[in-house]
Amino acid sequence: MFAVASSFAYTGNQLVTDFNAWKVSHAKKYDTSSTEASALAAFASNDAIIKEHNHKDRSYKLGHNEFSDMTWDEFHATVMNGGLHHTRGPKNMMRTFIQSDAPMADAVDWVAAGAVTPVKNQGQCGSCWAFSTTGSVEGALFIASKKLVSLSEEDLVQCDHVDSGCQGGLMDNGFDYISKNGICSDADYPYTSGSGTTGTCKSPTCSPVATLTGHMDVPKGDEKALKAAISNGPVSVSIEADKSAFQLYKSGVLDSPDCGEQLDHGVLAVGYGTDTRSIWHPFATGKDYYKVKNSWGTTWGESGYLRMVQGKNMCGIASQASYPTGVTASSGPKAASPSPLPPTSAGKTHYGDPKDGCLSDEQENRDVQGTTGDFCSPACVDISRSGVFKCAVDVPTGVTAKPECALTDPTTGGMYCALVCSPTADIVDQKVADAQCGANATCKPVTAIRAGLCTYDD
């Protein structure tokens, strides 16, 4: 009994020493002795979780950070705070097609490419959705303009009334808000909701510095499509983060059977790669991973970043991913609505064979990822700026395939239409599928997006 008590006293003294050092490094102060005692108790509990986990042979490690003085319930009620809504609105697109002239790279890092702003901190506000939204728009704006601008989460938290500010929101709704109103810079409209209070929308509002035309949803659970999307720019993703592994994550590739798909946190996928041995990662696992930017400050994780294993839809990372389209710089009010779909030339229709010449509002699309052939493709048009995009419906004689707003240009973010001749890539009767494309085109299966497209082989 005496020996056990002595051992406990030593451990307790060491724990207090560690807690005091942690307080200094994180500039923590407490108003009352009882508050500090509660913080120490939470620190002790988290310290035990960290040590127990790190003694196991796992692909990731836990460690102390600025949240170490919180119980899980306190962390969930303040930092997470119901930050992600689950229901998406009506879909603009039935499918997501990724257009590419080259295979995907083995590894992508948009941080190294300069397309990602420094790690931010949402504080005690469930505004993760706003940080995820601005992150993908910041990346798309950099890719389009080569200028990295930190955008205003406060603009979304305060002024996007479809969402609920510090009580949660959804990235798709954030994109819709920006498409209608633009978004201000962080410099003009800085983040002040970290205390947990949403406040009111700034009036008069600042001048928007970026706008967009729409967004695309990555097919649920399709990690190949998710990687293809990330290869074109940062992507907003939803994950389940209601586990102690997230509160205390420190390093490595998160690969845990305990992580489910109950989505409650919005983050930003900024790359992918393989965990290979280096001076920074001497105990590499060889696992393929997604690189994810969080909004919990730089003391969390790998300087604010997380790596999550590929191929397992880990924590639901591929369950609700989306990215903005048509992102451009803006220096004032939004432009007037575009004109209606243009009329066709006499005797010609959209979706024809490029060898006969495409119409003025079309481009020649060739080498769509996963298929062959080419075709004329008109742009998708949002006539009323309602977020609902439409395709020209005039088609060549004999065509019964359906025009769909189905292609994304990774360079410009623009969206284009194509003739979808099969709802799946598995074409049961090729002759029937080809007949949908008329006399001169054929239906090509596209495995990556589980559908067929009408293309011309010449």
Image (spheres, rainbow, N blue to C red):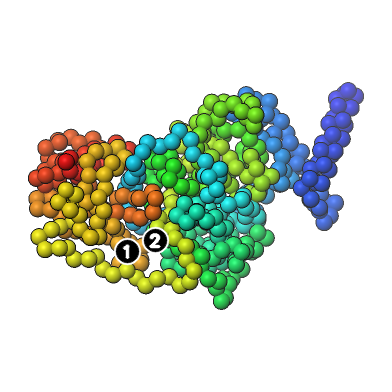
Q: Where residue 206 sits: x, y (%)?
A: 55, 71
Task: Using the rendered image of the protein, determine whether residue 67 is visible from the camera's viewpoint.
Answer: yes
Mark drawn on residue 432: none
Q: Earlier in the sequence, mark 1 or mark 2?
A: 2
Task: Please tell me whether residue 379 is drawn above or below residue 430 in the rendered image.
Answer: below
- Kind of element beneath mark 2: loop
Displayed quadrant of residue 187: bottom right
Is residue 157 something that shows in the picture? no
- Read off the residue under disc 2: 213
Name the residue type under label 1.
Asp
Q: Circle 1: is it few (<14), some (14-19), or many (20+) Cα within 10 Å? A: some
Instruction: Give me the residue at 14% from left, 35% from top.
Output: 429
Point 49% across, 69% down: residue: 331
Left-right relation of 28 to 434: right
To which quarter of the image does residue 60 belong? top right
Q: Position of residue 379 (x, y in %)?
A: 28, 57
Which residue, given by chain and number where applicable, does mark 1 sit on? Answer: 382
Q: Are marks 1 and 2 in contact (CB under 8 Å)?
A: yes
Q: How many marks do you count on the picture?
A: 2
Q: From the viewer's perspective, is 7 left or right of 245?
A: right
| Disc 2 packing (10 Å; few <14; some 14–19; many ≥20) | many
Does dot 1 land on a helix, a strand or a loop?
A: loop
Q: Answer with the quarter of the image where residue 386 lies.
A: bottom left
Q: Position of residue 452 (x, y in %)?
A: 23, 41
Q: Is residue 235 left or right of residue 282?
A: left
Q: Position of residue 95 (x, y in %)?
A: 32, 48
Quadrant where the C terminus is found in the figure: top left
Tell me if residue 159 comes above or below residue 29 in the rendering: below
Please name the amino acid that badge 2 sits on: Thr
